[in-house]
Image (cartoon, grey):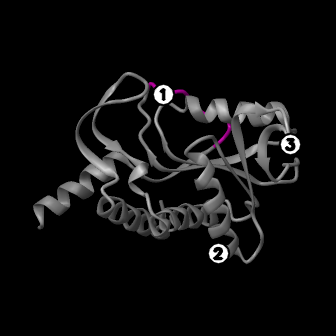
């Protein structure tokens, strides 16, 4: 990890703790496991907070996949995130960036279909954005849905927090980048408590 990535991660941790997005205690997770820490992205519940979260993710994309021109997010949490990150990344790059998200159910009327946004092609550099990755099953399912509908590939997955365990599903041939990890969050919280 280079200096720019480390600085970005530290700034994100500070912001996330200020927004109380990290909860410390005893939590049951979606995959049935338990954890002493939970990342609650619903804590970013205002326009300014969503803009800042999206700016962090956009900066990470610019560092890791600078040619990205299409942001994908899965319904539901990924919808506002994909839209907001595409706006922030377009501003950072000075070039337009598309967004794409899926519907939970295929729409039968109006514009129809299972997706909303830019129709991707095999020339697009697509990045999947989300708040967190735990088992990777949601990311794999989301990518499979897109790959089944379009002749494309994903360049990367970028998340706020990587909380994968060693037993989590691998994400074949798609690198995962995160702003931070649970270990970093624990260490950061501990340093704040030790130096009030």
Q: 10 Å neighbourhood of mark 3: few (<14), some, or many (≥20)?
A: few
Per the image, the residue denoted by label 1 is 168
Q: First in sequence, mark 1 or 2: give its number.
A: 2
Q: Quadrant of residue 141?
A: top right
In the image, residue 11 above or below residue 36: below
Q: First in sequence, mark 1 or 3: give its number.
A: 3
Checking the image for residue 110, the label placed there is: 3
Q: 10 Å neighbourhood of mark 2: few (<14), some, or many (≥20)?
A: some
- Does residue 170 appear in this view? no
**Residue 125 image position (x, y, % from top left):** 77, 54
Judged from the image, the secondary structure of the residue bearing numbered disc 1 is loop
Camera-side mark, 2 or 3: 3
Residue 48, magenta (yes or no): no
User: Which of the pair 43/18 is nearer the observer?
Assistant: 43
Judged from the image, the secondary structure of the residue bearing numbered disc 3 is loop
Tell me the chief SS of the magenta region.
loop
Camera-side mark, 1 or 3: 3
């Amino acid at each position: 990890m280079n200096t720019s990535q480390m600085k970005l991660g530290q700034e994100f941790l500070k912001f996330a703790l200020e927004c109380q997005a990290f909860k410390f205690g005893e939590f049951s997770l979606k995959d049935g496991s338990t954890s002493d820490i939970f990342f609650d992205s619903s804590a970013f519940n205002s326009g300014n907070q969503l803009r800042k979260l999206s700016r962090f993710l956009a900066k990470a994309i610019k560092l890791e996949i600078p040619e990205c021109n299409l942001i994908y997010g899965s319904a539901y949490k990924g919808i506002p995130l994909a839209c907001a990150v595409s706006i922030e990344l377009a501003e950072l790059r000075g070039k337009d960036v598309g967004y794409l998200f899926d519907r939970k159910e295929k729409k039968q009327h109006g514009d129809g279909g299972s997706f909303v946004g830019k129709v991707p092609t095999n020339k697009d550099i697509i990045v999947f954005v989300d708040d967190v990755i735990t088992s990777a099953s949601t990311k794999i399912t989301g990518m499979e849905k897109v790959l089944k509908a379009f002749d494309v590939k994903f360049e990367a997955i970028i998340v706020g927090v990587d909380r994968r365990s060693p037993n989590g599903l691998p994400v074949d041939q798609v690198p995962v980048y995160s702003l931070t990890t649970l270990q970093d969050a624990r260490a950061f919280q501990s340093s704040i408590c030790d130096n009030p």
